[in-house]
Amino acid sequence: MGTLIAEVAALGLAIAFTSPVSVVTVILLLSMSNGRRRALSFVAGWLIAIAVIGVLTVTVLQGQNFSSRQTDPSRVASALEVLLGCLLLVGSTVAYRRRKGSTHSAPAWLDRLDRMHWSFAIGVGSLMLTYSLCVVAVAEILKANITSLDAGVAFVVFALASITTIAAPIVVAIAAPERSEETLARWKLWLIGNSRTIVLVMLMVIGAILIARGTYSLTA
């Protein structure tokens, strides 16, 4: 169980650090009317999406035997890891080679959020979750062949790790409201200028790790 917790926590952090656009989104939401409510709704939508995945995993797939590498479900899960790893590695490598110079403006669609009801941020948060890495976390939890309670704990750890970066601006805004505007403005500028490179490099690393892990499970 300890190994699984470490693995899902690492996957959660991988989501957190490959989501700079999500962090920028939270920063912009904080600057809008009902800013904290919008930002918290975004995080809530993110967590709700993970909770739905967790419930479906525990109730629908938990009965399958994924623990043995020789079983069909386990081999499918390992093959899925390899496939996702290849997609991430190839896609991010191609995008990295074609990337242009850094940009200093946030995506235009983010400005429209200020004209929408604050609750719309729930849907935005659920859509911006990195689902490919969620699938990998599901595969790891299923292969561990643990109880439903332990699987639920693993999903909670995964979810909390995944929000470390998107929750940071909210913590800053609450802990130091008098300095938060300047601090978050610096964060936003840096993230906008470097987000593409950060994401692509992280995805290349994650893709290579998934390929190695999945291949080992299939050939062992």
Image (spheres, rainbow, N blue to C red):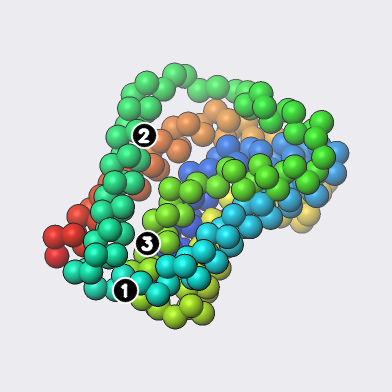
Q: Are marks 3 and 2 in contact (CB under 8 Å)?
A: no
Label 1 neighbour load within 10 Å: few <14, some 14-19, many 20+: some
Nearest to N terminus: mark 1 or mark 3: 1
| Rendered residue at 70%/40% (across/down) | 27
Could you tell me which secondary element the residue under label 2 belongs to? helix
Hey, what amino acid is under mark 2? Ser
Whole-Å distance between the Cαs marked 2 and 1? 33 Å
Res. 184 visible in picture: no
Residue at label 1?
65
Q: Residue at x 20, y 55 (%)?
A: 215
Whether 204 is drawn above or below 217: the answer is above
Q: Is residue 89 left or right of residue 40?
A: left
Q: Amino acid at mark 3?
A: Ala
Instruction: Name the residue: 32% across, 39% down.
Output: 87
Residue ID for mark 3: 139
Residue 162 visible in image: yes
Going 37% across and 64% down the picture, which residue do you hit?
140
Rendered location of residue 207, percent (x, y): 32, 45
Q: Which is nearer the N-term, disc 2 or disc 1?
A: 1
The residue labelled by disc 2 is: 92
